[in-house]
Image (cartoon, helix red, strand yellow):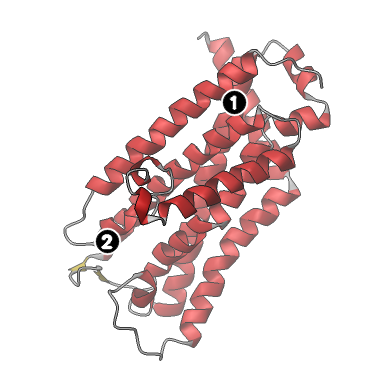
Amino acid sequence: MSSTGQAAIGRFFLSELRLIMGRRRNQAGLLVLAALPVCLGVAVRLTESNPRGDGPPNFVDQIVGNGVFLAFAALTFELTLFFPLAIAMVSGDAIAGEAHAGTLRYLLTVPAGRTRVLVVKYLGITAASIIAALTVAVVSAVVGILLFGTGPLTTLSGDQIPLGTGLWRLLISTAYIALGLCALGALGLFVSTLTEQPIAATVAVLIVTATMWVLDAIPQIAWLHPWLLVHRWTAFADLMRNPPDFSTVRDGVFVALGYIVVCLLAAWARFDGKDITS
């Protein structure tokens, strides 16, 4: 690709990113994502005198001992609903929103090409996924440290690791979650090419995500679980054991990349031959 083409894609991407981050509903969604760890931290702070249960240790149990664990706990909680909702909104609106607003035909009249439009739209979704995951991780860590302090982290295995090592594992966990959200965004982009109603695309992505969570909870179809996108979303918890177990995270990365490739190819095949009427 020529330098002129790269510059054009760069300008197009910056315009798309401003469009995504400038929408009030997306700004409100980001505030909701950031507010949940604050609420969780305050709730744990008010009830920290309650005894812990007899079950195995989890991130919520560890928050009182070290505020950094609030980030791990918040990331886990947001994976079930809030992250999928945020990415469904952004990805569902990518193509369907342009068609619904009547701007898709105009967008394609400039020398951009359908493939370039899809690439830039997905880059915008990727950026939104990274911003969402980083926002929750950073806000949670800051709030947790302010409320509970910090220091060496006691892993889920009961051993202690230095604070720097714990923060590094938090960064890896955040990147892993962002990759999973990018895979969901690729699915949403494909769905967005199937309709001209962004709300319908958003709801469809949420239904697919909820269905995968339900299927993942049914032991009778355990053979299907490894192929579900959400099955290994919480595998980053294995990074907070000593020694850390990267095998499940590695499998989750491969599944996410597989979803990205398949969904983007499906989106390209659909969009490249689609009759644009609006």
Q: Evaluate whether residue 57 shows in this view.
A: yes
* Residue 90 numbered mark, or none: none
Determine whether the residue tagged by mark 1 lies in a helix, strand or loop.
Answer: helix
Q: Where does residue 141 sit, x and y in percent of width and height?
A: 43, 65
Callout 1 amino acid:
Val
Left or right, residue 61 beside residue 31: left
Check the image and report above or below for 104 versus 258. above
Q: Where does residue 73 sit, x and y in percent of width and height?
A: 42, 66
Q: Where does residue 170 sit, x and y in percent of width and height?
A: 35, 56
Left or right, residue 123 beside residue 21: left
Most foreground residue, 43 or 96: 96
Residue found at the very far front of the displayed protein:
220
* Residue 240 numbered mark, or none: 2
Q: Evaluate whether residue 116 shows in this view.
A: no
Check the image and report above or below for 251 versus 258. below
Check the image and report above or below for 218 versus 155. above
Left or right, residue 275 beside residue 85: right
Most foreground residue, 65 or 221: 221
Residue found 46% across the figure and 31% down from its top = 260
Q: Give the Cα distance between marks 1 and 2.
A: 35 Å
Answer with mark 1 or mark 2, whichever residue precedes in sequence: 1
Badge 2: residue crowd in 10 Å (few <14, some 14–19, many ≥20): many
